[in-house]
Image (cartoon, rainbow, N blue to C red):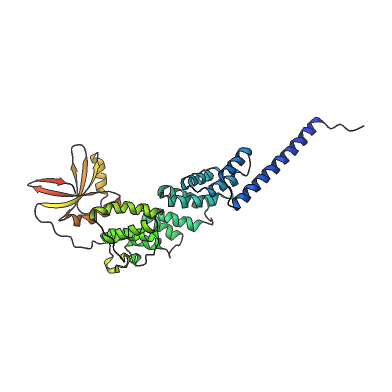
Amino acid sequence: MSKLIPLKVLLLSAAVLYSQIIFADEKSDLLELSKAFNNNTYSRQLGDNFIRKYPKSNNLDIVRFFSAETETNLNKSEKDYLLFVRLYRKSDFTETAYFRVCGILYLSNKIDSLIRQSNDYLYLFPKGKYRKEISILLIKGHLLSQDYTKAEQILRRENISDSILSDYAQYRNYHNRGFIANAKNNPADLYFAGNILEKNKKINEAFSAYSDVIKLFPKSPEAFSSKKRIIQLMPYKPVLVNRYLFISEDRIDISPSREITPVNGGEYYCVEIGPFYNLAEAKKIRVGIRKDYGSSVIVKRPREFAIYIGNFSSPEDALDIKIRLSEELGFNGHIVLVRKNGKNEYYSGE
């Protein structure tokens, strides 16, 4: 007489067998995806099919990473990696996903997002394999956003001393003039060299540096920034020049390249910033303007306030302060002519 097997045991055995079959199918499908990825035949459709077939799989991170790695559209790839780092904090691919998305944000000139994601990486992976590369991207982000102090802090923390980034941060913080003579032919170098040349009123040379960035490295974030700088230079009708990086070091200085002409008569030029819509705001801004920009006054208009800075005999003399206000404080000012008539002063724009 055969021994009867309880129904409960039969059901359990069937469930185990079914799960083994499912697991075997999933393992086989995942192996096929891996082969396709390694053979450059992987497609997002293959990955989406796997996710629909195995929505609770423990291998979804692998599939999503494959999809992000093979996406050719920069914006879609960025979204894929950002989704990945949100969903999988402990995946074997998380560190690489952070590295990839930081690179994409840099190429896309999304500097604020780059700084945020780079800092996230350094916090999550303090001894990560991409630490130096991420740190350099973070330094570039701070330099492009003109936060030179933070850039130098990272340079010191990471002990990065043989880099153009270090040279540039040293220039901006301490006026180390050796940077420009050592500039190399890459977008960061050329853009930062142009930045210095512009600051020193070498308009044609700066225009040439920015133009080369756009011509030689059209997809770089520095090309995007160079286009904005060229727009600011166009009123001065710049022309292309050769050998703009070979200006002797004794002429590359933070101080103006010309002497300021003293003001005579009843007219002078100054730099206007504003408008500000309440007096308290205008006073707060004025307090933050250093004396080396020149004297400053607050002028009331019918519905707003403006701050007028400096006292110059020509618009060329006022240009240095205008550029410095833009670069160092972020104010896009205008050069205005002031005419005195008795006790009254009249202002007219550029």
Between residues 309 and 30, which one lies in front from this camera angle? 30
Q: In the displayed structure, does residue 19 sit left or right of residue 187? A: right
User: Quick one: which residue is furthest to the front in this view?
Assistant: 41
User: Residue 180: x percent and y percent?
Assistant: 34, 65
User: Residue 147: x percent and y percent?
Assistant: 36, 53
Q: Is residue 55 visible?
A: no
Q: In the displayed structure, does residue 51 sit left or right of residue 154? A: right
User: Residue 55: x percent and y percent?
Assistant: 61, 38
User: Quick one: which residue is furthest to the top in this view?
Assistant: 7
Q: In the displayed structure, does residue 311 sit left or right of residue 49? A: left
Q: Where's the N terminus, which quadrant? A: top right
Between residues 122 and 322, which one lies in front from this camera angle? 322
User: Residue 139: x percent and y percent?
Assistant: 42, 56
User: Quick one: which residue is furthest to the right in this view?
Assistant: 1
* Residue occupying image coordinates x 23% and y 53%: 235
Q: In the displayed structure, does residue 338 sit left or right of residue 64? A: left
Asked which quadrant contains residue 6, the reply is top right
Asked which quadrant contains residue 84, the reply is top right
Asked which quadrant contains residue 202, the reply is bottom left
Number of marks? 0
* Residue occupying image coordinates x 43% and y 52%: 107
Q: Can residue 149 be seen in this view?
A: yes
